[in-house]
Image: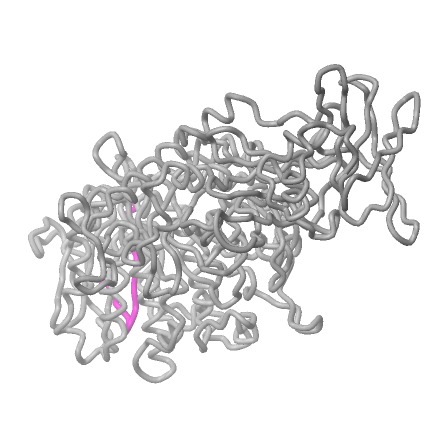
Amino acid sequence: MPSDLPSQLCEDTIKALQRGHHATPFEILGVHQEGDLVWLRVFLPQATALDALTPNAELPLQQIDAGVFVTRLPSIDTPYQLRATFEGGDIWIFEDPYRFDPVLGAFDQHLISAGTHHHLWRALGAHVLTHQGINGTHFAVWAPNAQRVSVVGDFNSWDGRRSPMRQLSHTGVWEIFLPALDDGTLYKYEILPQNGPAVLKADPFGFGAQHPPETSSVVRNITGYGWDDANWMAQRGKKNHRDAPISIYEVHLGSWRRKTDEGNRPLSYKELADELVNYALEMGFTHLEFLPVSEFPFDGSWGYQPVGLYAPTIRFGPPHEFRDLIEAAHKAGLGVILDWVPGHFPADAHGPALFDGSHLYEHADPREGFHQDWNTLIYNYGRTEVRNFLTANATYWLEEYHVDGLRVDAVASMLYRDYSRADGEWIPNHDGGRENYEAIEFLKDMNKTAYGEVSGIMTIAEESTAFPGVSTPVDAGGLGFGFKWNMGWMNDTLRYIEKDPIYRSYDHHLMTFPIDYSFTENFILPISHDEVVHGKGSMLQKMPGNEWERFANLRAYYGFMWGHPGKKLLFMGCEFAQWEEWNHDQALDWDALQGKNHKGMQELVRHLNQLYQATPALYQRDCDPSGFQWLCNHPEHSLSAFLRWGNPGEAPVLVACNFTPIAQTSFRIGVPHAGIWREVLNTDAVTFGGEGRHNAPALSTIDLAWDGHPQALDITLPPLATVMLQLTTD
């Protein structure tokens, strides 16, 4: 080895560079001054010659060992580029990554260390930008326990020795600016743990990913989208409020429709922006809810096992095209809700599991960190940086993609340490109890941050227990969600409607009991994807009786659902009573709409949505007990009737349900006010597939006390039908 060399290039240092074990490459590579001498040091394996191109000269670098090159520069500020020659004569002129200063400043580093960076994605991940006058991409990743972290890709032959990153003091963040890299670049992080061989990991903050089963991250420039939805954004707070009509169409983007003549491919984001948005608008829904779109490796998980929380799945197009879909919905007056999964993640090798060789994102103890039901890993909510990663992700979707709401998946599994675990398979909290204090604090923090950072949004909890205050504000002692799925209502009413009518009288309480807790939370009534898969059958298959009775039962049930307090959610295909249960690998059975009963069911749901939006009594007090009043219950006949009240001055609506196949041609109901009632819904209407047994256009009350009410009303209740009447004249 020549004696006239920079002192830092000792043999051990050179060997560490060559093996890819050097932890502080910026201290060695690039331009450094030693006394009066300025040295340029470059490590470039496979290069046979290297020159520094300065404004005044071409300076050849001396190769002192395999891949290690040095030369002197006139001054520490001398600008230069590098020209490398490889075997075979290939020449590459490039900027030296090791001449650039850090991109992340002290304030970003402070917020990252404190775990309070509400816009963490703007610091970490891969960002296309101009740094010190040069275009390129800045990479930053949290890996505090790594010995060395490198960015790898086609640009450096996936060689982890070529682009090792600098570690930023106490933050655990590694970063580097790589000139010339742009949108579309494939990359991963090669991480050398303290013990064991190097591993390749996708970027937890990556804004894009390869199409599965490939697993690389993709540089995506998510800046510069020209949003044209200002009108929606200005008024969406009213659309998402608990006194607004909210009717949600839940959609799995990959199977709503498919192009059978093009290899059965799913629709793209841009195609969905046209076809899905127009359909939902025509059907009268107010919101679309998408099963998770964060990048996920396995189609069969439907997105509920994500590894790329910051990347819209590439299955349907790049990020800006996902924005096209959201913008199209907004311009049509539709809100967009995303299913969001902060509860667990799969153990795929390229994902966050054992990210830097340690249990970084997940708990080390499987009694805390392993989901037995789903074979997945559980986030360590007690770790500040992990909470920040997840909380910022919620804000990311709301801010960067103008999403109007997040439905948080499997909240119950987060709240309880013993969720789906036997004795001895879980660790109690510090008080000896089962509540997961760390997860509870995370959920509170997420909701406070989301509502505090982004106006007009909603968060929704899929929470299946009686945990108190799920939709109570955090400052009032709750978890801070805007709404909660009413799983109790769903389970009870489906158990009831699946029974043969001859047995329903014994279980009438299943339809009436849910009202006892309907106002303890801001509830959404969900008929979701979970109810029509895994052998549960479609909604139509759940119904008892012959074909006509099945359709009539389902029509009556939907009428009851839209009349009942609570916002509405219906999974795709349920609106036209698809015969078969949902299959994520194929499109909905749109051909079923050739049948009049299926077409009638679709027309009923359209009418219910339109009636719901046009009738304040059906939504204004969804979350207020003053908006509901029982009129009568006759368990022996499976009959119920109740009133829905809106704000003062709004006409009430009477909802009457007959869940037997026996018509009630003169069913007397007590009502609180005299007047004329007009039929606004009858699920037995011919246009819905029924037999057209209607009430008279105007029904006058009878001056007769009945069932504790001062007036009475005689109505026709067709078999297996729901009827709604609205008071028009006092």
Towards the viewer: 386 or 533: 386
Task: Please name the predominant secondary structure of the magenta segment in the image.
Answer: strand
Towards the viewer: 524 or 153: 153
Q: Quadrant of residue 499?
A: bottom left
On the image, the x and y values in percent for residue 247 come to: 41, 51
Q: Which residues are magenta?
A: 715-730
Q: Quadrant of the N terminus?
A: top right
Left or right, 540 with respect to 599, comes to: left
Left or right, 633 with respect to 319, comes to: left
Q: Residue at x 30, y 80 (%)?
A: 544
**Display colour scheme:** one colour
Q: Was residue 167 drawn as part of the magenta stretch in this picture?
A: no
Towards the viewer: 229 or 57: 57
In the rendered image, is residue 678 in sight?
A: no
Q: Residue at x 36, y 67 (%)?
A: 531
On the image, the x and y values in percent for residue 464 come to: 26, 56
On the image, the x and y values in percent for residue 705 come to: 8, 53
Give above or below for 620 relative to 217. Answer: above
Give above or below for 239 relative to 153. Answer: above
Q: How many marks?
A: 0
Towards the viewer: 193 or 674: 193
Q: Quadrant of residue 140?
A: top right
Left or right, 606 with respect to 258, comes to: left
